[in-house]
Amino acid sequence: MVAMHREESFVIIELGSYMTKAMQDVTDVNKLPTVSIRSRAGIIKHEEATEGIPTVSNDNQTPVELKDASTSIDSATRELVEVPQADESKTETGLTSDSEQDSNGPNYVFGSALEDADANTIDSTVEIMTNGFVNDWDALSAFLRHIVTKELGIRISDNTSAFLFSIPVQWPKSDMENLAQIAFEDINAPTIMIMEQPLLAAYGNGGVTGIVIDMGHDTTTVTPVVDSAVQNSSIAQTAVSGAAVTTRLRELLQADTETREQFDDASVPLAFAVALKESGLCAIQLPGSDAADSSERQSFEFGGKSYTVSKDVLARAPDILVQPTQASALVLTALVRQAVLGCDTDKRAALWENIHIVGGSTQFSGLRERLQFELENT
């Protein structure tokens, strides 16, 4: 029998290659995530691990083969899974303990603590996920413990919150089993559900059939959803995404003499390009619209100093999301067409009529209008 859980205690965690988001309490469907944290872990040098830096350790966890998880999650059925609450005695293993103990294993640090940490105390950093897939399961386990205990303030030893994990598309069944094992054993979740992000995006817009364009940091993924089922065989993907926009923007800024000369070493820092990209000044233009004059400048504050950048650069950089500059990269409309044509003929009309754009890289002004223009004119 499945127990009922109050909406106030329900937890949603969206795993991403660049950012992971989380929230508790779903009584307000318009509520934004309360946690947004970089999906990266810092490994503290062993001699520094006990000197005041907040860490999360995976005590008594050896890198076992997680694929042998006792709980099997079938991505086709996505069933709600209920397990009994852990005994208090289980805290002896360290798996459900709220304390952060020293161990022979890695000690991790995340978020602002990692950003503020002295570089001399960090042995190395780990990208927990790349291109939607997990690189380090031990780091992910510690990462989820950090989110649950430090960001959401939930005690693992008496955790009563149901969890919904929103995962990137195309995870194999073994990865879902690994995540389930971590949820049950390491954060003591009583109930979990694992669902693909494109399916949740369609549901969030009130649909069960449609094309979901997810523009993330590492990749742009075009996923067809038909009658609440992700069509894995028809997914189209490209590496032209947020990271590519950052690279393109920095190249254009570096090529602009007036911008380059504003820096002491005549080199545009990556951090400057990232901040400029996320400032809201970059915008995607419609073809035929009045192009910005290359001589027009836009002021921008960074690091307590005022800079000016070309308005033409601000328009050209994000344009690669729709029209890539690389000859080998497909344009966005071609990816959409590829995904639609991979589905049954009688479902294609419904797919064309329901296109959803999600992901951090869809925040550029003008993207929706440009995509609609391209789809109607190609």
Image (cartoon, rainbow, N blue to C red):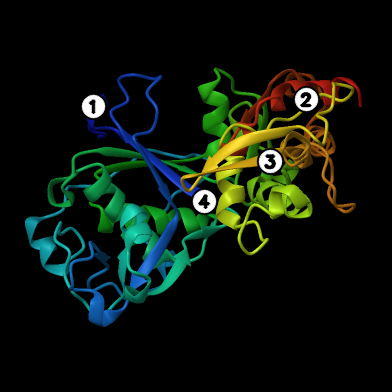
Q: Quadrant of residue 8?
A: top left
> Horizontally, is 373 left or right of 182 in the view?
right
The residue that appears at 18% across and 72% down in the rendered structure is 51
Mark 4 Cα shell of 10 Å, populated few (<14), some (14-19), many (≥20): many
Q: Position of residue 111 (x, y in %)?
A: 36, 53
Q: Nearer the viewer, residue 297 or 312?
A: 297
Looking at the image, which residue sits at the far left? 88
- The first of marks 4 and 2 along the sequence is 4
Relative to 158, residue 347 above or below: above
Q: Identify the residue under disc 1.
A: 8
Residue type at numbered disc 3 = Val
Q: Quadrant of residue 300?
A: top right
Image coordinates of residue 21 in percent, x first then y, are 41, 41
Q: Is residue 124 above or below residue 183?
A: below
Q: Which of the 4 image quadrants contains residue 277?
A: top right
Residue at image location 55% in from the left, 45% down from the top: 275
Q: In 3D space, how far apart are the residues under numbered discs 4 and 3 (Cα atoms)?
A: 26 Å
Name the amino acid type tagged 1.
Answer: Glu
Q: Where does the image place residue 48, in percent across and percent down from the top left?
A: 24, 77
Q: Secondary structure at mark 3?
A: strand
Residue closer to the observer: 157 or 45: 45
Q: Which residue is mark 3?
A: 309
Residue at point 37%, 53% (across, down): 180
Is residue 4 visible in the rendered structure shown here?
no
Residues at marks 1 and 3 touching, judged by CB atoms closer than 8 Å:
no
* 2 or 3: mark nearer the eye: 3
In the rendered structure, the answer to whether residue 285 lies left or right of residue 364 reads: right
Disc nearer the start of the sequence (4/3): 4
